[in-house]
Amino acid sequence: MAVVGKSPVKQGYRNPCTDVKDRSSMIEVQPGNNKNKRSLECEIPPDRSTKKPRRSDKDFALNTSYTSVSEWASLPMDIFFLTLDKLFELIDHVRLAVVCKHWNDVSKAHNRTTQRWCKVLPMLMIPFGSRTKRMVCSLSEGKIYTNVQLPVPYDKRCSGSSHGWLATADETFAITLLNPFRKAEAIHLPPLVTPYDLPGCQSELQKHRDELKKQYHYYVRKVILSADPSSNPNNYVVVAIYDNCCRLAFIRAGQRDWTYLEEPYMFSDAIFHRNEIYAVGLGGIIASVDINSSDDPSSHPKAIIRTPLRPMVHPVFPYKADKAYLVESSNGDLLHVRKFLKPKEGVDQKLGVVNFVVYKVLFSDKDGSIVKQNVVDSIGDDALFLGDNHSMTVLASNFPRCQPNSIYFTNDIWNGGIGIFSLANKTVTQLYRPQNPIPPAIWIVPPNNGLC
């Protein structure tokens, strides 16, 4: 596994997964290496007083085992805060917080003061080793947690990752939501109705449905949630982009049927913004759906086109992108991101040539229509995380090794690669090359476990 970073590695080290000449900026973790396992250890210096004989290490361990716990539990808050500032991963804060009630209270106070874990850095969930395991890669640590295996079906593609929940689909096109970080029950949603299931569909078209069953992993293109079902069990909405025409449907918590939009616009991504669903198509069309207009799933609400129907105009790239995304910036602006992929010349075509164009969406105060989309050359301290996941933004300065003014992307297009696109110099750095490209890697956000 190779992760971009500036931490040094041992001289002469050779990465078995990638053939990269400059290894000084890459870190590799081997499975089964005990040094990869994370643990919280406290060392107490031995007593070096000359007034009494020096005790053996064994005697020291026996005599201090009862006193060290209370001493460490009563650390002053300012020292505790300095310690927490040096822990760069959420998982380390959670491990520290569960030691005792005092440490838990101080950890929560630290996060309320710093707001550090109110927005968590995504981790990359990857297939690893044998075809049975899903593990997570930490960007801040620059390594794979080989001792953490997520209970996620290995043979299924994740159709979405939102608020810590993963979405998978089965042969009936039913969607299941599961949270690999919590002991929460899976949420089973009803099957999506395909166009070939509608009344009046000719019998000869049923063969197309049989073909879809063979590709059910990719029939559901993307799933996002409006909120975390663990925190809002009765008040969340699930949006699905599905079918070869990239249609859109949504369902509320507790409903038994999906609500379907009438018109397909080849949607590529969706986001909850301004209390509505905003969706973007490959050709640049942005539409909104008022999910509060009706609670009746049979009402078939219409998507309101917020942009002109004319194609996107760009001097370099074609109007139709390979992928399009909608994401909120750290200050609440809506960004429209377009991804263009060109096959790489030569033998290695896994990463390809990737380019991104970012637009800032400007709305009309009168009717909510989009009046303009300005090309953005810099997104400042923001880092975008795009792919099959719920598109999201973090402030790079809050996390070690997270690069500002960059786009972290996964292979949500065949042979699209996993890398970092710098908006400053328009270059791509390969972040990770999977040994097994199937199932695809996906960004996932671990829960903060009550630290917020």
Image: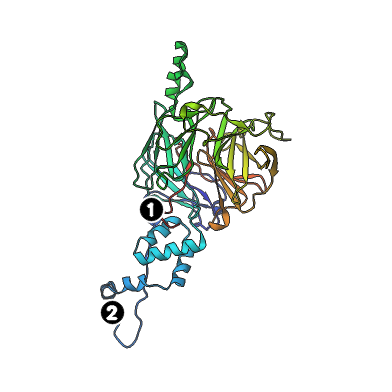
The first of marks 2 and 1 along the sequence is: 1
Q: Position of residue 177 (x, y in %)?
A: 40, 38
Mark 1 residue crowding within 10 angstroms, few (<14) / some (14–19) / many (20+): few
Question: Of all residues shown, which one is farthest toward the bottom?
Answer: 51
- Residue 416 visible, this angle: no
Amino acid type at circle 2 is: Arg
Asked which secondary structure carries label 2, the reply is: loop
Q: Is residue 403 above or below residue 300?
A: below
Q: Nearer the viewer, residue 49 or 313?
A: 313
Q: Position of residue 423 (x, y in %)?
A: 65, 47
Q: Nearer the viewer, residue 12 or 116?
A: 116
How far apart, in angstroms, are the residues tagged by discs 2 and 1?
34 Å
Instruction: Identify which residue is drawn at 69% across, 46% down.
Output: 377
Q: Mark number for residue 33?
A: 1
Q: Is residue 208 above or below residue 157?
A: above
Instruction: Identify which residue is drawn at 47% across, 42% down.
Output: 162
Q: Position of residue 252 (x, y in %)?
A: 44, 36
Q: Is residue 400 above or below residue 238?
A: below
Would you name the residue on which mark 2 appears?
55
Mark 2 residue crowding within 10 angstroms, few (<14) / some (14–19) / many (20+): few
Q: Which quadrant holds residue 135?
A: top left
Asked which secondary structure carries label 1, the reply is: loop
Instruction: Identify which residue is drawn at 50% across, 40% down.
Output: 389
Q: Which quadrant holds residue 302?
A: top right
Q: Which quadrant holds residue 245?
A: top right
As drawn, is 36 to the left or to the right of 6?
left
